[in-house]
Image (cartoon, rainbow, N blue to C red):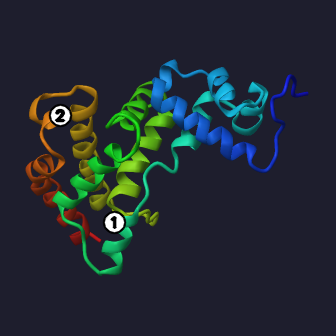
């Protein structure tokens, strides 16, 4: 029974919880964020969070699932072209810096969760390998292409880790365009091989 003015579950409750959870996770990070804090932000009883999502990790994954959309990928596909490495790196970094929160904060939250949970690590991997340069396509790759796709993921996560978590040198301080120009050719070497292998 929900008490003292907290709103009960209804059609919009799940969405309100997800919006509140995303805000709390981005503000506080995965480790410090608490289910009670999310419940207060959503103005619901904490029990509803467990009812809808089960665990803090499951709530985190659900709240972050819509973080990375594929507008640029879809546009490239519609034009019948393969995105180059510079565009892939640029899109990747712009997504982490396009929200109202501190630039890179969403990546830091994902990185914290990925460091403590295989499920969250799988979410980060999905963001990188499926959503970012594959445009959300889910069909399996061949073995050789799968290995090269993993190399793309390694590069992108490494760039973001250096920029947002470690804040290392020019990778952290220079513009997205400059960083994309440095690493784009490396991404090209992998993506060209990926498409050749399929």
Residue position marked by numbered label 1 in the rendering: 72
Where does the N terminus fall, quadrant-wise?
top right
Compared across the picture, whether 44 is left or right of 161 comes to right
Residue 40, percent from left and from top: 68, 25
Residue at image coords 68%, 33%: 42
Residue 74 placement: quadrant: bottom left
Q: Nearer the viewer, residue 102 or 157?
A: 102
Residue at image coords 59%, 34%: 21
Q: Residue furthest right?
A: 1
- Residue 172 has which mark? 2
Residue 150 in sight here: no
Where does the C terminus fall, quadrant-wise?
bottom left
Q: Is residue 143 above or below residue 24?
A: below
Compared across the picture, whether 167 is left or right of 17 comes to left
Cα gap from disc 1 to disc 2, whole angstroms: 24 Å
Q: Residues within 10 Å of mark 2 (few under 14, many from 20)?
A: some
Whichever of callouts 1 and 2 sits on the residue coming sooner in the sequence is: 1
The secondary structure type at the circle numbered 2 is helix
Q: Residues within 10 Å of mark 1 (few under 14, many from 20)?
A: some
Residue 84, percent from left and from top: 19, 65
């Amino acid at each position: 029974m929900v008490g003292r003015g907290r709103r009960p579950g209804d059609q919009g409750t799940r969405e309100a919880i997800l919006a509140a959870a995303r805000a709390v996770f981005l503000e506080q990070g995965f480790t410090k964020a608490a289910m009670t804090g999310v419940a207060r932000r959503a103005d619901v009883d904490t029990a509803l969070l467990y009812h809808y999502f089960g665990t803090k990790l499951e709530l985190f994954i659900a709240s972050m699932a819509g973080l990375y959309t594929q507008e640029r990928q879809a546009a490239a596909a519609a034009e019948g072209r393969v995105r180059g490495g510079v565009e892939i790196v640029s899109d990747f970094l712009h997504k982490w810096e396009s929200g109202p929160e501190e630039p890179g904060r969403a990546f830091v939250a994902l990185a914290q969760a990925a460091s403590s949970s295989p499920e969250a690590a799988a979410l980060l991997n999905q963001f990188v390998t499926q959503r970012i340069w594959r445009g959300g396509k889910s069909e399996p790759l061949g073995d050789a292409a799968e290995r090269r796709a993993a190399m793309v993921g390694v590069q992108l996560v490494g760039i973001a880790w250096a920029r947002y978590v470690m804040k290392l040198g020019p990778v952290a301080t220079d513009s997205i365009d400059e960083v994309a120009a440095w690493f784009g050719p490396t991404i090209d070497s992998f993506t060209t091989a990926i498409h050749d292998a399929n």
